[in-house]
Amino acid sequence: MSDFADMMTQTVTYQTQAGHDSAGDPSWSAQSTAAARVERRHEKILATDDEEILVTHRVATYTAIPEGARVWLPGADTSSIEASVIARRVDVAPDLETGAELREVRCG
């Protein structure tokens, strides 16, 4: 097992956009969970559309959580949309020990 995997002792819940309903509003997938390491960090970043945004957390995981997903951090009420944060940027790098893709999901 990778040293990175050993550090992923927390669990996040996430939900991805599945499409749009008849009114044009987003529809969402069922909630899923992922092993992760969550760090609280307030920082301004450039989103993929070059917009400067404030994020409040970094989530390291091997799970493919896409930009725009709703993410509930450890301890958050997963029945409340207001308790979620949005995945604003996802950076991917290889884990050199396992070859798996390690993702850094920045949320805010």
Image (cartoon, rainbow, N blue to C red):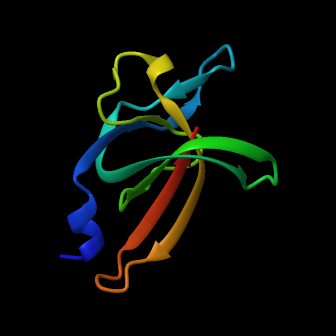
Q: Nearer the viewer, residue 21 or 105?
A: 105
Q: Nearer the viewer, residue 80 or 9?
A: 9
Residue found 37% across the figure and 56% down from its top: 63
Give the left or right position of residue 62, taking residue 84 as reference: left
Residue found 33% across the figure and 41% down from its top: 12
Residue found 25% across the figure and 47% down from its top: 10
Residue found 40% across the figure and 38% down from its top: 14
Q: Quadrant of residue 79?
A: top left
| Place of residue 91 in the rendered image (x, y in percent of width and height, measured from the top left) | 56, 64
Q: Nearer the viewer, residue 53 or 32?
A: 53
Q: Is residue 98 above or below residue 90?
A: below
| Place of residue 107 in the rendered image (x, y in percent of width and height, measured from the top left) | 55, 43
Give the farthest residue toward the left: 1
Q: Quadrant of the N terminus?
A: bottom left
Q: Quadrant of residue 37?
A: bottom left
| Place of residue 50 in the rendered image (x, y in percent of width and height, measured from the top left) | 81, 54
How many dots with numbers? Answer: 0
